[in-house]
Amino acid sequence: MLILQIENLTVAYRGLASPVLAVPSFRLGAGEGLAVTGASGSGKTTFVNRITGLEAVESGHVRWGNEDLATLSEGARDRFRAAHIGLVMQEFHLFPGLSALENVLLPARLARAVGRADVTRAGELLLRFGLKRPDQDVKTMSRGEMQRVAVARALLRRPGVIVADEPTASLDTEAGAAVTDLLLSVAKEEGSSLIVVTHDPRLMARLPRRIELAAGVIVQDSLGEAA
Ligand SMILES: Nc1ncnc2c1ncn2[C@@H]1O[C@H](COP(=O)(O)OP(=O)(O)OP(=O)(O)O)[C@@H](O)[C@H]1O
């Protein structure tokens, strides 16, 4: 169970008058759900890339429990992410030519030896997600099916934190609703924190807390409104 605590996080690029992200203080309790919204260019991806350790925290602190991503090397951040964060991206990043099952297992295969328990869990996740053909090549799947494979892959190692960047953006209403249901129900069952970047009002409405970014600043936080 990991609490997210951000302090004085600033991301600035040379030549730009102001930082693209400036978060003086932010906290998300373990197991909580958060929607991150904001116009194009407001800093959502920048935020996600820093809290997941995909990119270095050069100014400020991003702590998950006692681990400060600002103090970790790229390799250590990668290991931290592999152990604790399940990532679902808008572009699914699946490998065509590999089956659904192999795609779910791939990150685990790259990180370590894959055991029978991993294969069993991968198959169970796919089945639960309504994908009855684990051997189907992902390149023959619909977008909704591919996104469900990507969600299954993110959940294989039971991450304490699930981060999804526009997980329903390229899906039709029905497929988007299916992916939303899966993310919410699995996060709840496993007690995982769930952070979702989204413009999708249906998805937003189902998360207990919402922040809005504008020009790199959190301009609205529904937690503050409720208090
Ligand atoms: N490497 C970079 N160098 C300069 N500017 C950058 C760099 N990366 C991002 N930016 C700028 O930072 C701002 C925030 O970008 P970011 O991708 O986080 O926005 P976003 O909210 O995710 O947008 P979208 O919804 O369009 O994906 C943008 O103005 C972008 O142009």
Image: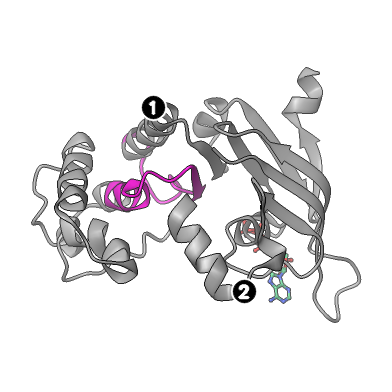
**Span colored in magenta:** 148-174
Residue at x-position 48% and y-position 42%: 160
Residue at x-position 56% and y-position 42%: 195
Q: Residue furthest top?
A: 227
Q: Nearer the viewer, mark 1 or mark 2?
A: 2
Amino acid marked by disc 2: Ser
Residue at x-position 71% and y-position 57%: 43
User: Viewed as shown, does residue 195 lie left or right of 149?
Assistant: right
Q: Secondary structure beneath disc 2?
A: loop
* Residue 50 falls within the magenta-colored stretch: no
User: Viewed as shown, does residue 12 lie left or right of 157?
Assistant: right
Query: What residue is disc 1 on?
Result: 189
* Residue 133 shows up from this direction: yes
Sooner in the amino-acid sequence: mark 1 or mark 2: 2
- Rendered position, 189 above or below 100: above
Query: What residue is disc 2 on?
Result: 73
Across and down, in percent, residue 155 comes to: 35, 46
- Rendered position, 189 above or below 58: above
Q: Residue furthest front?
A: 66
* Residue 89 shows up from this direction: no
Residue 110, label in figure:
none
Q: How would you rate the neighbour count of disc 1 (Cα within 10 Å): few for under 14, some for 14-19, many for 20 or more?
A: few
Q: In what quadrant of the picture does the C terminus appear?
A: top right
Across and down, in percent, residue 57 comes to: 72, 66
